[in-house]
Image (tube, rainbow, N blue to C red):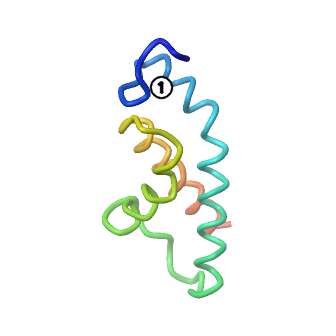
Amino acid sequence: MGCCSRDALCDRCLADSLAHLRGVAACRGEYWARCVADRVPRSRPWPRYEGKCATIARDKVRDLGRDARLREELARLCAAWAARWWAA
């Protein structure tokens, strides 16, 4: 990493950043689902990645990078791991 600005990662730097941060996004997603499970019965399915769910996921990973593509991919991973935990 380091060949481009943090605001606009090249494809290689994006892939490197995702490799480093995907576990963080996954952990945050699982923790998110656990916190929701404390308040809401798990009989309902986890919401799809759209609307409020997408907004919350984006907020949960906003601090992990400045590149919009990176943040979006991390948000999708966060929501996917939340849904995975929820369904288990």
The quarter in which the C terminus is drawn is: bottom right
As drawn, 30 above or below 1: below
The quarter in which the N terminus is drawn is: top right
Task: Please provide percent x and percent y for residue 16.
Answer: 57, 23
State the residue position of label 1. Answer: 14
Task: Please provide percent x and percent y for residue 81.
Answer: 59, 55
**Residue occupying the point 61% across, 38% down:** 21
Q: Nearer the viewer, residue 4 or 85?
A: 4
Q: Amino acid at mark 1?
A: Leu
* Mark 1 Cα-neighbour bin, 10 Å: few <14, some 14–19, many ≥20: some
**Residue occupying the point 39% across, 59% down:** 49
78 on left or right of 72: right
As drawn, 69 above or below 83: above
Task: Please provide percent x and percent y for residue 59.
Answer: 44, 59
As drawn, 44 above or below 65: below
Residue at the top extreme, as displayed: 3
